Image (cartoon, helix red, strand yellow):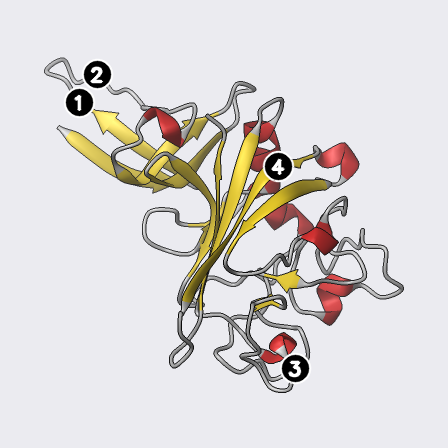
Amino acid sequence: MHILTLVFGVILCVHLSAGDKCEVCYLNDCCEDPISSGGRNIKTSEGKIFGAFCEQGWTYIFRRFNGVEDFYRTWVEYQHGFGDPRWREYFIGLDNLASFVKGRECKMRIDLEAWPPVSPAKRFAEYSIFSIGDKTDKYRLTIGGYSGTAGDSMAAQNGQRFSTYDKDHDIANENCASSYKGAWWYGKCHASNLFGWYKGPVCPSFAQCVAWYNWPAIIGSPNNYYYSFKKASMKIHCC
């Protein structure tokens, strides 16, 4: 018998044998099961355990697609993670992410989908270099090697530490997370804000929504800081 449930963000895959023995199943990485997709348990080399959505060997860091999950959250919530990776929006947590990529060579991909009538609605940005520091360095982002169709809106965030509205680690005079209703690797402040307000397609306030400024066409008015995307996700591949 095979049962799936969710406890504190971890998907428990329980196998019940004839002797009623239970075992929780873990992957070290989604690439260990590159064919299937769906919610799986991940256990890092440091022993961090979390649930994540897997798809063709990629491990999703976050998924946003309907605005049900509130991403305007505290530092502690972002450290631990939130949401449900099986079928809801979620973020795996900064501590889990830092442990997952530690000492590994990873590539990262962001997929974006715009609201109709934008065409093509789906574009992507892929980065051949991706890592983050641990909590002592406030999860500082290292990212580079862009390719794709969405435009590069992460270059400005390279080298920046993570900020939330209650923990300001950006290099601006203001608290970017508070000003732009999100959490991110803000600098002065952002060219992307994928943890911003889910409002679509029109963002009512400058740069406060699910923003990606360098989309190849102007789809917001008067510019792309006034656009909020329908879907956004970030996934990594370290194998």
The location of residue 190, given as percent across then percent down, is 72, 62
For marks 3 and 2, the one nearer the N-term is 2
Q: Earlier in the sequence, mark 4 or mark 2?
A: 2
* Pointers 3 and 2 in contact (C-beta within 8 Å): no
Q: CA distance from mark 4 to mark 2?
A: 42 Å
Pinpoint residue 97: horizontal percent, then vertical percent.
Answer: 57, 36
Write the residue at 66% across / 58% down: 183
> What's the amino acid at mark 1?
Leu
Camera-nearest label, 3 or 2: 3
Q: Position of residue 179 (x, y in %)?
A: 74, 70
Q: Which mark is residue 129?
A: 4
Query: In this image, 84 relative to 229: left or right?
Result: left
Position of residue 158 in the picture relative to residue 182 (left or right): right
Q: CA distance from mark 2 to mark 1?
A: 6 Å
Name the residue beneath numbered marker 2.
21
Reading the image, the residue beneath label 3 is: 205
Q: Identify the secondary structure beneath mark 4.
A: strand
